[in-house]
Image (cartoon, rainbow, N blue to C red):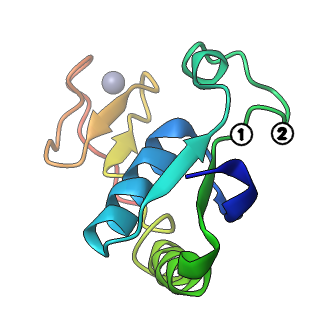
Amino acid sequence: MHDSEIVNVYCARNLIEAEFLKNILADAGIESRVIGDAAVILAGMLQNDEGVPCLWVRRSDESRARGILTDFEQRRNGPHSDNDPPATWKCSACGELVDDEFDLCWNCQNPRSAY
Ligand SMILES: [Zn+2]
């Protein structure tokens, strides 16, 4: 792949998402490249857009790749993804976060409050 032949189709939130999407595209037979400063991203030092990992594909694959990525975004933004309540509750006595499966606070044995 030469740089002149590839186009940017998506900028991921982080490297993990970028690699995940790269695998999805690979499953569809689309070769892609993640371009971004991986070392900076992994170190958690990134605070701006400069090192955001972006996915690049061949121009001939662009429309297909965009379709796949749009599907991914729609699923991610669907009602059952990020909007689900967290599977924890907060102890009203000590403020610890307790896993949803427990009815007593692991820290102070205070029962789960009914709210
Ligand atoms: Zn507690």
Residue 109 found in image quarter: top left
**Mark 2 vs ligand 1: CB below 8 Å:** no
Q: Which residue is drawn at the image coordinates 24% and 29% (left, top)?
A: 105
Query: Dot 2: few (<14), some (14–19), or many (≥20) neighbours within 10 Å?
Result: few
Residue 115 bears which disc, if any? none
Q: Which residue is drawn at the image coordinates 54% and 20% (left, top)?
A: 42
Query: Dot 1: few (<14), some (14–19), or many (≥20) neighbours within 10 Å?
Result: many
Pick the front one: 69 or 96: 69
Give SS at disc 1. Answer: loop
In the rendered structure, the answer to whether residue 23 lies left or right of residue 72 reads: left
Q: Which residue is drawn at the image coordinates 53% and 83% (left, top)?
A: 74
**Mark 1 vs ligand 1: CB below 8 Å:** no
Q: Position of residue 63 (x, y in %)?
A: 60, 86
In space, the residues marked 2 and 1 are separated at their CA atoms by: 5 Å
| Residue picked out by circle 2 | 49
- Disc 2 and disc 1 in contact, CB within 8 angstroms: yes
Residue 80 found in image quarter: bottom left
Q: Position of residue 65 (x, y in %)?
A: 52, 77
Q: Which residue is drawn at the image coordinates 33% and 56% (left, top)?
A: 23
Give SS at disc 2. Answer: loop
In the rendered structure, the answer to whether residue 10 lies left or right of residue 82 reads: right
Q: Amino acid at mark 1?
A: Val
| Residue picked out by circle 1 | 52
Q: Position of residue 53 (x, y in %)?
A: 64, 42
Q: Quadrant of ligand 1?
A: top left
109 w.r.t. 59: above or below: above
Q: Position of residue 73 (x, y in %)?
A: 54, 75
44 w.r.t. 112: above or below: above
84 w.r.t. 95: above or below: below
Residue 57 found in image quarter: bottom right
Q: Is residue 7 visible?
A: no
91 w.r.t. 108: above or below: below
